[in-house]
């Protein structure tokens, strides 16, 4: 096995007993070990002390007692700096954690401080794991419910604004043109544009078409956590769009249905969901594989 392969296997802690002996017999083995030790001790506030060229020259002369192959010396020094720089970069690079959910998929994420995030479908979340202890900040697109451990400031950054808390339960939806923050426990601060809005428990903030408004909420947690879609005076078209998304189906319905729906449907039973939205309006439906046809009239 050549020298390069030995060094690579040594860096991966993958040497056999025989290979370990071969590595230790290398001329530069002690130097490689020293680089690793220094890299592990090195941080941004330490300054490395480099020996002078004369001192290095004396050591090389006393070691070899013959003429120096300067090409080999320069190559070795260059290799040492490259290895050292690579190790330093590896030890200090950011560790980004990313999560993404697909249609009808929820994912529960435990953050480094034991805060819990329930990520709703079609959502993305990302944070810097290596800097979490000093900066509890994450980026969200979509919707998520947060149960935050008390501690330093906790920021949720969205395309519309930033939600900041110290420890509480809240829900953030940042999807399409809607930005909604609901506070279920504690106190939440929402920063958007040049405004700051504080939400105590039992209130929510909605930003739509550039206009923000506050209102009260009476539920203990978001309905989507219980696999329910809830509507209040919503157009039937919006209800159908949500049904298609939750069940990954196509729904054909009369285009002239000018009705508003207040109610809910569940996410894990299509038959029950269709009954919930059709029965109040005396509509009928037919399920055909991944397609649903809704019509006027009684069965």
Image (cartoon, rainbow, N blue to C red):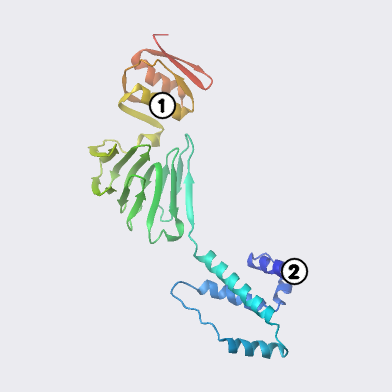
Q: Measured along the vertical axis of the image, is residue 280 above or below residue 73? A: above
- Of residues 183 and 159, which is closer to you in this image? 159
Q: Position of residue 47 (x, y in %)?
A: 47, 78
Task: Identify residue for label 1.
Answer: 241
C-alpha distance separating marks 2 and 1: 63 Å
Q: Residue at x 31, y 40 (%)?
A: 180
Can residue 157 be seen here? yes
Is 46 positioned to the left or the right of 202 in the image?
A: right
Q: Which mark is residue 2?
A: 2
Q: Position of residue 58 (x, y in %)?
A: 63, 90
Is 104 positioned to the left or the right of 19 in the image?
A: left
Is 201 positioned to the left or the right of 97 in the image?
A: left
Mark 2 surroundings within 10 Å by alpha-carbon count, few (fewer than 14), some (14 through 19), many (20 or more): few
Q: Measured along the vertical axis of the image, is residue 258 above or below residue 67? A: above
Can residue 186 be seen here? no
Q: Residue at x 36, y 34 (%)?
A: 223
Q: Position of residue 23 (x, y in %)?
A: 71, 73
Quadrant holding the N terminus: bottom right
Q: Residue at x 71, y 82 (%)?
A: 69
Q: Measured along the vertical axis of the image, is residue 142 above or below residue 56? A: above
- Of residues 82 and 26, which is closer to you in this image? 82
Quadrant holding the C terminus: top left
């Amino acid at each position: 096995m050549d020298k390069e392969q030995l060094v690579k296997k040594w860096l991966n802690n993958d040497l056999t007993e025989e290979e370990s002996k071969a590595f230790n017999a290398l001329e530069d083995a002690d130097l490689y070990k020293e680089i690793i030790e220094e890299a592990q001790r090195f941080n941004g506030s330490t300054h490395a002390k480099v020996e002078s060229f004369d001192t290095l020259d004396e050591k090389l002369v006393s070691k070899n007692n013959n003429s120096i192959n300067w090409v080999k010396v320069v190559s070795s020094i260059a290799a040492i700096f490259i290895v050292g720089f690579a190790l330093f970069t590896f030890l200090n690079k950011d560790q980004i954690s990313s999560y993404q959910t697909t249609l009808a998929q929820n994912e529960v994420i435990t953050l480094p401080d034991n805060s819990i995030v329930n990520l709703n479908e079609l959502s993305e979340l990302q944070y810097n794991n290596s800097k979490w202890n000093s900066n509890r900040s994450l980026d969200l697109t979509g919707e998520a419910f947060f149960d935050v451990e008390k501690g330093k400031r906790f920021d949720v950054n969205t395309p519309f604004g930033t939600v900041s808390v110290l420890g509480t339960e809240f829900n953030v939806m940042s999807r399409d043109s809607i930005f909604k923050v609901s506070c279920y426990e504690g106190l939440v601060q929402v920063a958007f544009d040049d405004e700051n809005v504080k939400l105590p428990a039992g209130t929510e903030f909605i930003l739509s078409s550039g206009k923000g408004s506050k209102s009260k909420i009476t539920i203990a947690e978001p309905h989507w956590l219980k696999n329910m879609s809830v509507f209040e005076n919503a157009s039937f078209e919006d209800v159908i769009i949500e049904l298609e998304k939750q069940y990954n189906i196509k729904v054909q319905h009369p285009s002239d249905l000018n009705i508003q729906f207040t109610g809910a449907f569940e996410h894990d039973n299509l038959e029950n969901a269709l009954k919930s939205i059709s029965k109040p309006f005396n509509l009928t439906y037919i399920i055909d594989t991944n397609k649903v046809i809704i019509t006027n009239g009684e069965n």
